[in-house]
Image (cartoon, rainbow, N blue to C red):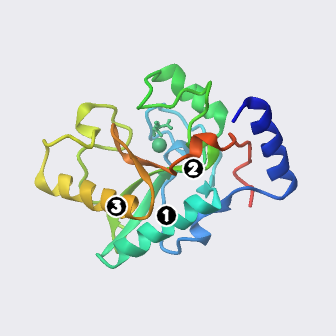
Amino acid sequence: MGGLANGVLGLWLAAAGSPVVDATEVVEDLVVDMRYATPDNFLKQKVYPDGARCLLLPQTAERLKKAADTLRAQGYRLKVYDCYRPIAVQWQMWKIMPKPGYVANPKKGGNHNRGAAVDLTLVTADGAEVEMPTPFDSFERAAHHGYQGGTKASREHREILRAAMEGAGFKRNAMEWWHYDLPGATKLPVLDVPFSAK
Ligand SMILES: C[C@@H](N)C(=O)N[C@H](C)C(=O)O
Ligand SMILES: [Zn+2]
């Protein structure tokens, strides 16, 4: 879809009401740790407002619910690190890490900017993080899905998360174990919604 069509669709969505939902209203046991609302992220600064929520397109949130339902039966919950991301923040990220695969090029917009991607990990039923191959946003080979190093437990957790997310209809990012996309989302418009939107 071209820029003009995206703009028209964006205006139509705005007129029809907010295009996003708060994911905690769809996934009742979702744990939210919006890292970019804290200085604990690769930018080393807080780039979201206090209380920034996990906003997603309804179809992204529904798939997340499906993954969470699968994982609950296995004794796990999902913890999100990032959901909808304003395009201005995408530009801030690109200045620091201009590497496609690790950060989407803001000229085209990434799927976070469309409410169609989520960064997340697995936690236990009581909310404790499980071991993964690397910390979140660690841009290195050990974060790739093909990485066979690290502990057996970390590889198993990555696989449990991958199976639940792909089973729910998400597409993995080969270079980031934590990032999942709504398939076909690049055709959707880049959004401009405040974190207070409902
Ligand atoms: C920056 C990282 N958390 C991430 O989400 N990367 C993808 C590729 C993106 O920027 O869309
Ligand atoms: Zn991501």
Query: With 124 as the anchor, is 58 left or right in this view?
Result: right
> What residue is drawn where x is 53% and y is 20%?
95
Query: With 52 as the anchor, is 103 left or right in this view?
Result: left
Residue 16 to residue 186: above or below: below
Q: Which residue is mark 1?
A: 64
Q: Amino acid at mark 1?
A: Leu
> What residue is drawn where x is 47% and y is 21%?
98
For disc 2, the neighbor class at 10 Å (few under 14, some 14 to 19, many from 20) is: many
> What residue is drawn where x is 82% and y is 58%?
17
Q: Mark 3: which secondary structure?
A: strand
| First-in-chain label (2 vs 3) | 2
Q: Position of residue 163 (x, y in %)?
A: 31, 61
Q: Which quadrant of the structure image shows residue 74?
A: bottom left
Q: Amino acid at mark 2?
A: Ala
| First-in-chain label (2 vs 1) | 1
* Mark 3 vs mark 1, CA separation in Å: 12 Å
**Which mark, residue 116?**
2
Q: Amino acid at mark 3?
A: Leu
* Mark 2 vs mark 1, CA separation in Å: 11 Å
Q: Which residue is mark 3?
A: 122
